[in-house]
Amino acid sequence: MEYKDYYQIMGVGREAAADDIKRAYRRLARKFHPDVSKEKDAEARFKEIGEAYEVLRDPEKRAAYDALGARKPGEDFRPPPDWESDYGGRVDPNAHSDFFEQMFGGLGRGRGTFRSRGFDTAGHVEITLEEAFRGTDRRLSVQRVAVDERGHPQPATQQLNVRIPAGVVDGQQIRVAAQGQPGVGGGPAGDLFLEVRLLPHRWFRAEGRDLSLDLPVTPWEAALGETVRVPTLGGRVDLKLPKGSQTDQQLRLKGRGLPGSPPGDQFVVLKIMVPPAANSTDEAQYRQMAATFAFNPRAAMEGAS
Amino acid sequence: MTDLIRALLLDESVEFSLADLCSACHVSEELIVEIVAEGIVEPHGVDRAQWRFSGIALTRVQRVMRLQQDFGVNLPGAALALELLEELERLRRAQR
């Protein structure tokens, strides 16, 4: 297994006082806590920091850790032959490295004397907006910890095939019952909680179950109130524009957002595009419009300094 | 090929009793009563026996518990952090 340099992880010296360690932990937790952090590897970093703090905050564990001497992080490491990993307590095996498990774990000691529910586990899964609309299946790899006959936890990777129901909104949790860590002494397994994150979409923006879409239209479609085809996640629909529509006006397609009760709406934001004057014929038409229309979009600004 | 496991969507349409919520979040009824009194989650139903919580409430209770444990703040502090985080997430989404 790999040696973990808990001091380096916490960014403190080996002689750091308990207060310094606590301060470093709090500062790092605010930066990497998965509930507050936007850092990419927040979950892994927070796990590492939590593990380091668990050892360094406890004078007994810290002294035992210090007695191992300083080593290079990641160095291959075997516990000393007389090492007695008996720190009691039950720790969440999913939250720790192999190094921690071997040195401070103690899971499974007293096996048979108590029965308890397995730990819940958490993670996240990224899906597209189309998948959120229709529901989707995801194959996930989860780390489970089984306890061998010597009472040592053995990590094992398992594949799960999870059906994510239609209508998930960004940041919402789903629960996969009994797929967390196995129970101890015949206790029930914990649950797996997954935060669903919606990947950005090329055309649609999601806000809860509502969607919005910028729709480019021609000046004549907007002015004359023509019918245009609009993409929705459920397929194209025909939308009649109100006569005299303007850029940034919003039209609502009721119930065309993400499914749910009630389903979300799709908002269509009109963007009027001006055709380029690509040749002399086009230019002539624009000049004719300039001559015919009594239209000054800046009328309200006239007289402003 | 592994079996297909159905995930439960924790939205407004699911309902948890007080006992369900306690067991899902591994907390005591007293703690949920405090969380309700703090206004962090709002159950439907007049008294504790009839309380029904949504899937969103479950997520909020879990987050507030994590914030309390991991940052060493009290319940009102965790509630404030939760609301600010939710507001931040809403703004970030609106900006995308």
Image: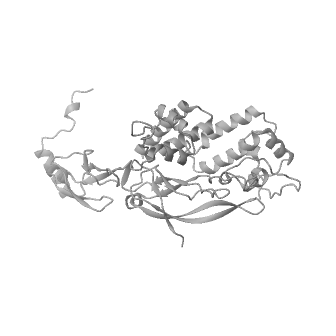
Q: Is residue B38 visible to us here? A: no
Query: Whole-percent x and y of residue A56?
Result: 76, 41
Residue A29 versus residue A184: which sits nearer the camera?
A: A184
Q: Pick whichever, B31 or A93, lies toward us.
A: B31
Residue pictured at 78% horizontal, 33% vertical: A17
Residue B42 seen in render: yes
Q: Position of residue B70 (x, y in %)?
A: 62, 39
Left or right for A61, reference A178: right
List x then y, in percent, for residue A202. Answer: 39, 56
> With respect to residue A233, does A44 lie above or below?
above
- What residue is shown at x 20% (from left), y 51% (from top)? A219
Farthest residue, direction bottom: B1
Residue A239 at x, y = what percent? 21, 55
Q: Is residue A199 left or right of residue A290?
A: right
Residue at position x 69%, y 34% in the image = A23
The foreground one among B55 and A254 is B55
Of residue A132 and residue A24, the one placed in the foreground of this image is A132
Q: Quadrant of residue B66?
A: top right
Name the residue: 16% across, 53% down: A285
